[in-house]
């Protein structure tokens, strides 16, 4: 028995020494002879065969990983998309607001030019807030009234020229009869030849210049301005442009002149009211002189 | 009483809407108008003489939104109301399509009176007729809306009655 035990212990020692030597050789080969030409083909062979096995496992796992990643990305992309959409809508609103402000600025600048032209008068800027309930009446409602100094028969201007006159005044809003209303009449003259007439509203068809005698030279394109004779509109305000002239039949003494107003009432948003009767002046006039 | 409150509230809302959004909805001299449908709807429900009070109050409200002569609205609306009452008193039952036809008929009456009264009688043809046809076409929508509003108002008044009884 002791002999058998000695033999087996020797075997173990030998096996251990062989294993250590083998490990040392392998380590030596890998560490010291790594770059040598003799070891390189063997190493490369291991690498190649290992690479094939690696590939065998790596590709499906990488696919799974990619799939998972793309799913995860998709989820984040969905959230990101929603956030970006919201941001886009917000930016579009902002751009629309800026554009609106820009256009409004342009309109107000034009109105300011009109205001500068009317140096002798105080003016009030008003917004159009509504219209008449009857569709055939060209009447708009503005957001200024008695407390802003408005009174009936005050001229109302847009950037392009006369738009109408105040006909009813409330405390904080007023009604403006547009030049195209069927009941609108404005004393006018043709700028080129100073021929007098009466600008009458014709609804959708614009206006007509009435009571211009047949002998008077009127052409398409002539500018029509206020004459100031009606004691409502100051002289020289732009009204419109002659678009057609017809010599009516023999029974009629006057020409048939169509006028297109410069200001398009259906598109106007801000208007300028000329305070032709100042409250202070009215008070002075009404109070007895000392 | 609920009918009268209903016509006044709906009339006011319609007038505000038409004067506020009228420019954007207008084509030529025509725009959607709920008032003739409202008058017809009310006239079918409310008998004389209480109905006259409702119609007159409605005309006062609507005339505040217009510059056409004050008397034109009560006159036109009252004639519309009386016409419907006369027709209703001579028929046993009135169907929905007949109500819509009636809206067109009452519309042309109202429009003729209003156009003539405001000095624009030349617009009756063709604009007045087109407006009446438009009112007739939009009547189902308006009548549906009025019915819904009336039901809500009735419900509220019943609940208030219960509370006061309790």
Image (cartoon, rainbow, N blue to C red):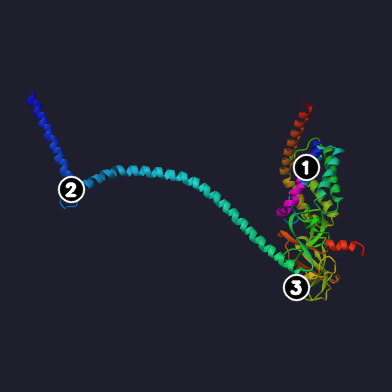
Does any portion of residue B103 appear in the rendered image? no
Chain on which label 3 sits: A
Secondary element under disc 1, as helix, strand or loop, is helix
Residue A26, percent from left and from top:
17, 44
Residue that label 1 marks: B9
Q: Which mark is residue A222?
A: 3
Residue A91 image position (x, y, % from top left): 57, 54
- Horizontal side of B144 relative to B81 (left or right) equals left
| Residue at 73 percent of width and 39 percent of height | B149
User: Judging from the image, what secondary structure is the residue with disc 2 in?
Assistant: helix
Neighbor class of circle 1 (other Cα within 10 Å; few <14, some 14-19, many 20+) is some
Marks 3/2: CA–CA distance:
104 Å
First along the sequence among labels 3 and 2: 2
Going by the picture, which residue comes out furthest to the front?
Answer: A290
Looking at the rendering, the stretch of residues picked out in magenta corresponds to: B13-26
Q: Residue furthest top?
A: A1
Instruction: Indicate the quadrant containing the C terminus of chain A: top left, top right, bottom left or bottom right.
Output: bottom right
Labels 2 and 1 share a subunit? no
Q: Overall secondary structure of the magenta stretch?
A: helix
Q: How many marks?
A: 3
Report crowding for label 2: few under 14, some 14 to 19, many 20 or more residues within 10 A (C-alpha).
Answer: few
Looking at the image, which is closer to me, A18 or B43? A18
- Residue B16 in percent (x, y) is at 76, 48
Callout 1: chain: B
* Residue that numbered label 2 is attached to: A42
> Could you tell me which residue is drawn at 61 percent across and 56 percent down?
A96
Q: Are marks 2 and 1 in contact (CB under 8 Å)?
A: no
Would residue A129 appear left or right of B46 to someone viewing this image?
Answer: left
């Amino acid at each position: 028995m002791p002999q058998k035990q000695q033999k087996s212990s020797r075997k173990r020692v030998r096996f251990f020494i062989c294993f250590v030597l083998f490990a040392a050789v392998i380590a030596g080969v890998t560490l010291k002879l790594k770059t040598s030409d003799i070891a390189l083909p063997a190493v490369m062979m291991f690498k190649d065969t290992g690479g094939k096995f690696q590939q065998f496992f790596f590709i499906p796992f990488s696919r799974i990983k990619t799939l998972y990643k793309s799913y995860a990305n998709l989820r984040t992309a969905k959230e990101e998309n929603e956030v970006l959409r919201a941001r886009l809508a917000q930016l579009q609103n902002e751009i629309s607001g800026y554009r609106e402000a820009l256009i409004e600025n342009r309109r107000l600048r034009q109105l300011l030019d009109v205001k500068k032209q009317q140096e002798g008068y105080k003016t009030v800027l008003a917004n159009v807030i509504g219209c008449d309930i009857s569709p055939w009446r060209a009447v708009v409602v503005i957001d200024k009234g008695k407390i802003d100094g408005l009174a009936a028969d005050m001229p109302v201007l847009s950037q392009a020229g006369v738009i109408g006159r105040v006909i009813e005044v409330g405390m904080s809003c007023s009604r403006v009869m547009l030049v195209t209303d069927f009941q609108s009449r404005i004393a006018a003259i043709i700028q080129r030849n100073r021929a007098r007439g009466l600008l009458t509203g014709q609804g959708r068809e614009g206006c007509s210049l009435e009571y211009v005698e047949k002998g008077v030279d009127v052409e398409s394109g002539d500018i029509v301005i206020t004459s100031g004779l009606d004691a409502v509109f100051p002289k020289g305000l732009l009204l419109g442009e002659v678009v057609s002239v017809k010599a009516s039949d023999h029974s009629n003494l006057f020409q048939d002149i169509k006028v297109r107003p410069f200001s398009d009432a259906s598109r106007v948003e801000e208007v300028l009211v000329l305070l032709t009767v100042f409250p202070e002046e009215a008070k002075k006039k009404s109070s007895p002189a000392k | 009483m609920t009918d009268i409150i209903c016509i006044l509230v709906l009339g006011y809302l319609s007038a505000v809407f038409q004067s506020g959004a009228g420019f954007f909805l207008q084509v030529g001299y025509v725009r959607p108008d709920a008032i003739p449908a409202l008058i017809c709807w009310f006239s079918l429900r409310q008998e004389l003489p209480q109905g006259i009070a409702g119609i007159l109050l409605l005309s006062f409200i609507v005339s505040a939104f217009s510059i056409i002569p004050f008397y034109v609205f009560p006159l036109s609306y009252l004639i519309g109301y009386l016409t419907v009452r006369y027709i209703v008193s001579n028929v046993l039952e009135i169907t929905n399509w007949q109500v819509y036809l009636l809206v067109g008929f009452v519309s042309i009456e109202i429009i003729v009176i209003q156009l003539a009264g405001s000095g624009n009688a030349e617009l009756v043809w063709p604009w007045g007729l087109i407006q009446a046809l438009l009112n007739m076409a939009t009547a189902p929508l308006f009548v549906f809306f009025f019915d819904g509003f009336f039901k809500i108002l009735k419900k509220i008044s019943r609940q208030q009655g219960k509370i006061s009884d309790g």
